[in-house]
Image (tube, rainbow, N blue to C red):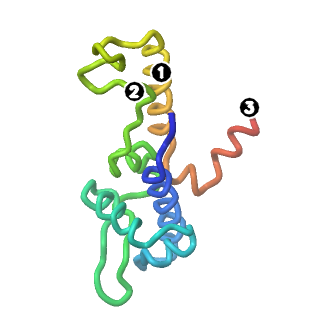
Amino acid sequence: MRLSTKGRYAVMAMADLARRQTDAERAVALADIAQRQEISLSYLEQLFARLRRKGLVKSARGPGGGYRLAREASDTTIAEIVHAVDEPLRATRCAEAKGCMLKGERCLTHDLWEDLGEQIESYLASVSLADVIGGRLARSRQAA
C-alpha cells in the first residue's frame, strides 16, 4: 500500500500549521507553508479547500489572513486529515462491490491486504497532530 502525495502533503502542511499556530492567534499563510515544506502553492490551495470543507481548518481573509486549525492539534487525527483529502486507506485493489479478479472474485490474499489496511487505519486514527509535532512518535519507536 502506498499513500499518495495528496495524503502525505496534507499531513505535512497540517503539522506545519499546528506548529505555527502556537504563535498567538495569527493565521498562517499557505505561501509560507508551501515555502517551508517545499510544496506547490496551487496544490496546497486545493488540499486546504478540502480540509476546510471537512471542518479541519478555518480560513481568514485580508491582511494577516491565512489558515488556523479548527480545533486543537490533540483532537485532530492523521486519519481524519488523510480522509479529508479523499485519500483511501485500503491495501486491497478491490473495488467496493467487486473483487479484484477479472470475474469479480476475491484474490487469495484479499484478507491479508484487507487486515493490513485496517491496521494502518487504526494506527493513523490513534496518532494526533500533537503527537507528530511533539515528536512523540520517534520516542515510542526508540522505547520498543
The residue drawn where x is 48% and y is 13% is: 109
Q: How much space separates mark 2 and mark 1, taking CA atoms?
A: 9 Å
Q: Is residue 62 visible?
A: yes
Q: Earlier in the sequence, mark 2 or mark 3?
A: 2
Q: Which residue does the numbered mark 1 point to in the structure image?
A: 113
Q: Which mark is residue 93?
A: 2
Image coordinates of residue 85 in percent, x first then y, are 35, 51
The image's mark for residue 129 is none
Q: Secondary structure at mark 1?
A: helix
Secondary structure type for disc 2: loop
Q: Which residue is mark 3?
A: 144
Q: Amino acid under label 3?
A: Ala
Whether residues under marks 2 and 1 lie with C-beta atoms below 8 angstroms apart, the answer is: yes
Q: Nearer the viewer, residue 89 or 51?
A: 89
The residue type indicated by label 1 comes to Trp
Observer-nearest residue: 121 or 89? 89
Residue 62 as seen in the image, left or right of residue 126: left
Label 2 crowding class (10 Å Cα cut-off): few <14, some 14-19, many 20+?
some
Mark 2 or 1: in front is: 2
Q: Residue visible at 70% across and 38% down? A: 141
Dot 2 or dot 1: first in sequence order is 2
- Secondary structure under badge 3? loop
Residue 61 vertical position relative to residue 87 in the rendered view, above or below: below
- In the rendered image, the vertical position of residue 76 relative to residue 14, given as above or below: above
Could you give the CA–CA distance between mark 3 and mark 1, rounded to whole angstroms? 25 Å
Name the residue furthest front. Answer: 102
Q: What is the x, y in percent for residue 138?
A: 69, 46
